[in-house]
Image: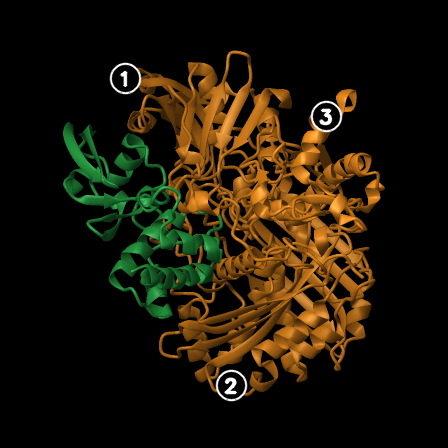
Chain colours: A orange, B green
Amino acid sequence: MKEGSEGLTVVGKGMPKVDATLKATGKAVYGADFSLPGMLFGKILRSRVPHAKILNINTSKALKLPGVRAVITGRDFPWGLKYGFTAITRDQTPLAQDKVRYIGDEVAAVAAIDEDIAEEALDLIKVDYEELPAVYDPFEAMKEGAPQLHDHVKNNISASQHLAFGDVEKGFRESDHVREDEFTTQAIKHGFLEPHASVGLWDPSGKATLWGNKQSPYIVYRKLAMALGLPPSKVRVIQTYVGAGFGSARSDPFALDFCALLLSKKTGKPVKFVYTMEDVLVMGEMRHPFYLRTKTGMTRDGYLKAIQAHAVADGGAYSTIGPVSIALPAFFIDIPYGVPNVLYDGYRVFTNKGFCGSLRGHCIAQLRWALGQQLDMMCNDLGLDIAEVSIKNALHPGDQTPGGYRITSCAFTECVEKAVEASGWKEKKGKLPPFHGIGMGTSSFITGVKLSGHNSASCVVKMNEDGTASITTGATDIGQGSSTIVCQIVAEVLGLPMEDIIINSGIDTDFTPIDPGTYGSRVSFYSGNAAKVAAEDAKRQLAEVAGKVTGAPPEEMIFKDRKVFPKNNPEKGWKIDALIRHAQHSMGRESKSIIGRGSYDSGVDFIDFKTGRGNISPTYTFAADVAEVEVDPETGKITILNAVGAHDIGKALNPTLCSGQLDGAWIQAQGQLLFEELKRDKKDGHVLNPSFMDYKMPTSMDIPLQNKHIFVESIDPDGPFGAKEVGEGASVAIFPALGNAVYDAIGVRIPDLPITPEKVLKAIKEKKEGK
Amino acid sequence: MKQLMKFNVNGVIYEEEIDHRRTLLEVLREKFGLLGTHKGCDEGQCGACTVLVDGRAVNSCLVLAATVQGKKIITIEGLAQGEKLHPVQEAFVETGAIQCGFCTPGMIMITKAFLDNNPNPTREEAKMAISGNLCRCTGYFQIIDAVMKAAKKMRKEA
């Protein structure tokens, strides 16, 4: 029997988050809530020009303003010391040094006794720029002679990715039908409600400590050290509660973090920065807008023979995680469908705009927007059912993709079948009245991307004298609920109820065990496994003590209901608290403090970025979504009547939290699909809608009228209790599902996101006119 | 310009010299240390700063503090009775309506104001009631569940 479902008492049960009461009472301390005595307040000056050399910055007037304690510019940081994702992509400095590259780039920072004075001082800083020609369109930026953002990067190609398996030309020749189509996606923001906030303290011992709302404190601490020129041990990052993340906009350090520390060093006081929502919406990071030209070849009975994709991603002004962003569509071109021949060419391009990074569904959503719709087009052309074609081409457990992905747990076929059944697909597809449509989309996603040197997660479980267990995890809970599922896993292993488990409320890079951070859909799998290993270590130690006091073999000890007892002799058991106290205080020189240690690495090899060969993730999730929409032909407004998703997430560790993750993923995607867009001025690239008034995110009135999630539990052989990622992959399949549903409703394909009412109306009108 | 102002927040009287330009949100957070009211957009778009003024839900970032002197202000800190949560808080905890929790205090306050006036709402009315408050994490479904559950709990207690 696969490990997972039988006899579980805590894992697999829907239960409230461990921090829910604190959050419901307003007692959770978020970034802006943290203060230190004697603190100063910082503000950042941003560039008002899109591309320019900095000739001189005069801060003397600002420094003379009463209440101002310090002003810093790029010159105050180690000159030329850059930070970034890899050695070749280190192109950011804490404040601009030689050049500014977009409207919003950070130029100077002020510390003053209050925010108003700091703000006023910004107006007194005079920056002399030598303006340079700028470029905002990635295709223009790649041309010879285009303005160059970074001296060392020719034609503004920030990163490129090529991948080829099999022979696509042969595949297209073997196909009965081949299509080539173009699709585009727009820039959107992560949209978290809590602006960035940090407090920096550079103490006289030389330690630089930062408190902040960070999603991946370990990334922040390494990059801070990199650009401040400090050994990592001199930097400490302490995480506050985090008002959501959704990607690299919370994983990376930003100007405020570096400046809070350096201004603290200069003034001898703690310095606090809180960004405004305008700051957040103007600055990097955001989702990459993509241009995708895709070509699919299929036999007349629906077998995929070849897929080719050409991608151009608008990266904005800096690299950040760009090499991964442009590679992920390549790495997910041949999953969840087995395709023998694939070819991918992708280019990420610098432009004079805010920089792009990872956002829930990291560039795989953009790929699926294209490929998932093209598959629907192929099926429509050939008179095939996309659900049947999906099953025909599905990957199965034990399969290996041409690049080398090992498919372990996989219930993709079952996902399609369940989505078909629950949505009434067979009764509805092709049978709905005009302006009423149904569409299917599918996806697969990583569970813990394996990228560079920082991959394993760790955990410590300390047994307390009253029988409770204290967990120190390296995982960062940004609202997704990792603290809760880590507690559930430890409680399950030790036979304790949830109320007996205590967990650290945040990361402190000096003291919490190593963890890569919250990205790449890794936390449940890696940190969950690390917690399981740590709890099992504590359990083994306690079992040995139990063996001594009961005379029964330690391996026969059962941990249940706060008791430890031999399997065949429950009445000889001890209460767990008594056993812990005995180990600590009654064993003389053999005294034992029961502390379990756990570390987990999947053991998967790194993928070779040059060839795409390898296995990028220890396992993969799969999904099939069906959306049903109604389009108002008078206004172009789209109403989602019903959304059904069947998600192979391995095992739902906490169904309540899983549902919340899936809901959230869908609605965030829905915003991008139907209306969200960061709009820019064509002349200078500045953001035209930097407020929630104009940058429209979904409200409760926009959600589908009905929704249904089906957990397809494939029980992963390596996942903790069988679990895989939940919540990121789910934001992908809904892209083509909704696009295909809109096509089904109006009979016109809208290839460019978002599918606004204007585009819908135009499409309906043109169709009527026979264009 | 500063002037002496007097406020009734959660039944506690606060008397302080306060700059007349300050919003209720700033005063709650910076002067009274009531940090449960969150500053999101600071321009009335996200609802994270929702509090009750004489029973009516307002975006405290859009209210000048000076204008609500003498009125009864309730913030998220004023709902629970010791360790006994308000039914709206209980419902939010139990249904999974809280993820990152940043919108939560505002959502709970708008829900309380709504249910105080409409104890037996339809799901559609609940959806409408929270439509001025943004949440990026939950997709709203579990929040609407929480509003309906809270209504039930409050009717039972009444």
Q: Distance between the residues labelled 3 and 2?
A: 75 Å
Judging depth in this view, the residue of B129 and A431 nearest the camera is B129
Q: What element carries label 1?
A: loop
From the viewer's perspective, tell me whether residue B73 is left or right of residue A189: left
Tell me which label, 1 or 2, sits earlier in the chain: 1
Q: Residue furthest top?
A: A204
The reply to the same-chain question for discs 1 and 2 is yes
Tag 1–tag 2 contact (CB < 8 Å): no
Give the chain letter at badge 3: A
Tag 3–tag 2 contact (CB < 8 Å): no
Question: Which amino acid type is shown beneath numbered disc 3?
Answer: Ser
Quadrant location of the N terminus of chain A in the rendered image? bottom right
Label annotation for residue A66: 1
Circle 3 is placed at which residue position?
Answer: A586
Label annotation for residue A221: none
Question: Which amino acid type is shown beneath numbered disc 2?
Answer: Leu
From the viewer's perspective, tell me whether residue A66 is left or right of residue A158: left
Question: Can residue A522 be seen?
Answer: no
Q: Position of residue A13 (x, y in %)?
A: 60, 57
